[in-house]
Structure formats: C-alpha cells, structure tokens
Image (cartoon, grey):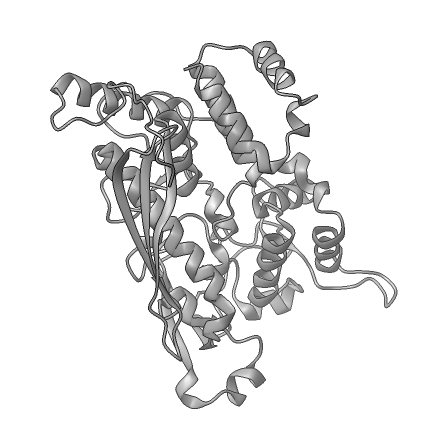
Amino acid sequence: MSNEIVKVDASQVIASWESPEVLTERIKRMVQIMTKVMIADKHYGKIPGCAQNSLFQPGSQLLSVAFKLGHEPYRIEDLSTDDEKRYRVTDRVFIQGTDVTIAYGIGECSSSEEKYMWRRAVSDEEFEATEIDRRREKFGKDYKTKQSYTTMQVRTNPSDVANTVLKMARKRANINGTIEALAASEVFTQDAEDLPEGFEFGDNKAAHAPSEKSNVQPSTAAPNSPNISSEDTGPSEDERKTRRLISSKQEGLLYKRCSISKVNPEAVKNYIAATKKVARGHFWLLSWSKPNKEAKSEFDKILETIEKKPEFFDKYIPVKTAPEAPKSEARPEPSETSAEATNEVEPTAREAFELNLGLIVEQAGLGTEAMDAGIQTMGYSALSEIPEADFVKVLNHFSEKL
C-alpha cells in the first residue's frame, strides 16, 4: 500500500454521526435508483417469505457506481475438506479514489449446500450404478402449481463446483458489503442465494419440471389443441408420449443448452408461441416426431439453432422496462418474467460496464454526445472499442464529473 496521503472530501467520509436529513436523502436516492434505473428480477427481486426486496449482484454494482464505492477481497479463507469445497470471503468496501474503508461484507459458500451437493442423474443407469450412499430420491413441490414430484439425484464431485462455490462466496460478500456500507437494509435485504430450503426464485421451470414419477394430473385439453395445459409444468409424461411431445428431461436439456449458449429461454418460448400461433409458448409444445428418417424434429431444430445460431433468438427477447416510481410507500412488485430463469445468468462485463457508464452519465447531466466526446478524448474511437481492461479507468474518469 502506498504511503502517499490521499486528500478526501469531508462530505464523502462517513462521519461518526450523520443527521437524519443525510440518512433520509441517502435512502431516497437508493429508492430513486431502484425505481428509475433498476429492473425487477434482474437487479433486485422479492423472495417468498421476505417482506423487502432482495439485492442481486447487478443491483449491487449499480449502487456501488452511484455512491462511488470500491470493493476488493480483503480475506479469502479456504475451509475445505476432502469431501467439501468451502470458502469464506471478506469484502472490503472503500470510497473510490481513496483508501478510506467504510464497511466490510462477509459471504460464505459450500459445495455441501443443497444446490451444489446434488445433481439430477442423467439416466436411470447412472443412478443405479452410483453407490447407495451417494444417490437419493429428492422429494420436491412446485410452489406455483402445488404439485409434488420426485427427482433421481447423485452426489456432485466437489472439485467440479469449486470455482462456482468460490465465486458465490465472493458475490455474497460483495452484496453484503454494499448493504452494510449504505445501510441499505432499509430498502434491500439479503441476496437471493440465501433463499430458504424449499423455495425457488423466479421462473426456474427446469428445477420444477416433474419427473416421470410425478403425480401431476393429466390435462383435459382437446387432443389436437396446441394449448395442452395452462400449467408451466405441462401435461403428464404419458400424455406427452401420446401427443408426441418432448419429455420433461428433454425440456431440462433445452434449459441447459440455453444456459451454455447464453440464450434467454423466454426468447425461445416467444419464438415457439409465434410459430405455433399460441398466446404463450412452452418448451413442451415441441414435438420429437420426425416426418421421415431424413427430416429433423421440432425439438432437434430448436436445439441445433440454440447451439449453432444463438443470435437467431435475439429478436424474440422479451422487452422489460423499469417499473414506475411507486405512488405510495408500497414497494414495487417484481414482474412475472424472471431474468433468473436462466440459472442466474448475469450481464456480461461489457453490458454491466455500459449500463454503469450510462448511469454515471445520466447523473452527471451529460448527454450521449458529451459521453462520446469524453471517450474520444481518452483515446478511444467509440464506446464499443474500449477494452475490458480499461472499464474501471473509464468509469472513474466519468465519475469525477459527478
């Protein structure tokens, strides 16, 4: 650490006591950012059983830029054992441009957590070949349809999820640090990763899809009706076979391929709705049937397009707008469509950078032309030409204009 003395504006330092007016203004500003900039289910969301909105990592990043907060891992503790990967991360929060520490956040994650410890068996053969103490039947309930289901699961190799566990601990510490630094629990509560066992956030249908042992009742829809069921889980497995529709396992494969190819599954569903001329698209509307041996089924075509031409679905991405400012003290409810449906897919580094830069420019009262001119004075021909390594430098440059 440099011995150089950094001069800090007294108004930036969190004093030993702040007036009610200052605290009220800070909370008001957070609410304004939430209602005017943030998007429900992307930057924040409401978890069953929690009265307040929960802050997600993209939302934490926006608040950090707005209030000029810097984050760095202060301590990373490896608490792993032979059969578990476990990390605890302490996040140091400081004022950008200074070395003034204003808060610490802490986050921990373990491969023994339910979501990392078990995975669905790829086949009945894998389940039967797995040691009895490393497999189980998981009983679950879809809290939307109120239907119960069972899933055949096997233990995950802890080393396969070590990087994910470390990143999750880091993310939890980052969000906790933001909330601690801004006293943001007045507006936001814990991250969605602290969701209690038995609940699922958003529209994660892959996790809710019933197995063949599910007791979901068959649909009573007409045999040739495209709208076979109004439930997201779709018809029973027997009904799927009768109508030559893909199985719940094939649905799960589609979700997985969407996640790998970074395709929004809601965009694929919108495409299905458009081609089949139905109000709402579902993966289970696809058929596995082939007209002939040389032809491909609807399922095969969709799967191939997701893998080889993911940009095809860009035009079908659902448009989401920021919620209007509440007229009363009631918090805005999140929309039904969840960006977390893609297994918590977050914006790319460039998307987050451009979003944060736009926020800074707006707060500084600058227009697009002024932003482009500022970028060019820094030696870049355009916003898209700024390399990822310089994102922080550019953000700090424009932050100085606030």
Query: Which sits in the foreground, 319 or 263?
Result: 263
On-image quarter of the N terminus: top left
Splitting the image into 4 quarters, where does residue 251 fall? bottom right
138 with respect to 309 (left or right): left
Residue at left offset 74%, top offset 64%: 289
Residue at left offset 56%, top offset 54%: 228
19 relative to 118, above or below = above
238 relative to 183, above or below = below
Residue 397 appears at what percent x and percent y? 50, 22
210 relative to 304, above or below = below
290 with respect to 331 (left or right): right
Is residue 381 something one can see in this rendering?
Answer: yes
Q: Count numbered badges in the picture.
A: 0
379 with respect to 53 (left or right): right
Residue 172 appears at what percent x and percent y? 35, 50
On-image quarter of the C terminus: top left
Query: Which sits in the foreground, 235 or 60?
Result: 60
Residue 192 appears at what percent x and percent y? 35, 49
Residue at left offset 47%, top offset 50%: 344
Residue at left offset 74%, top offset 60%: 300
Is residue 189 something one can see in this rendering?
Answer: no
Q: Farthest right residue?
A: 294
Query: Which sits in the foreground, 7 or 328?
Result: 7
Query: Which sits in the foreground, 382 or 270?
Result: 382
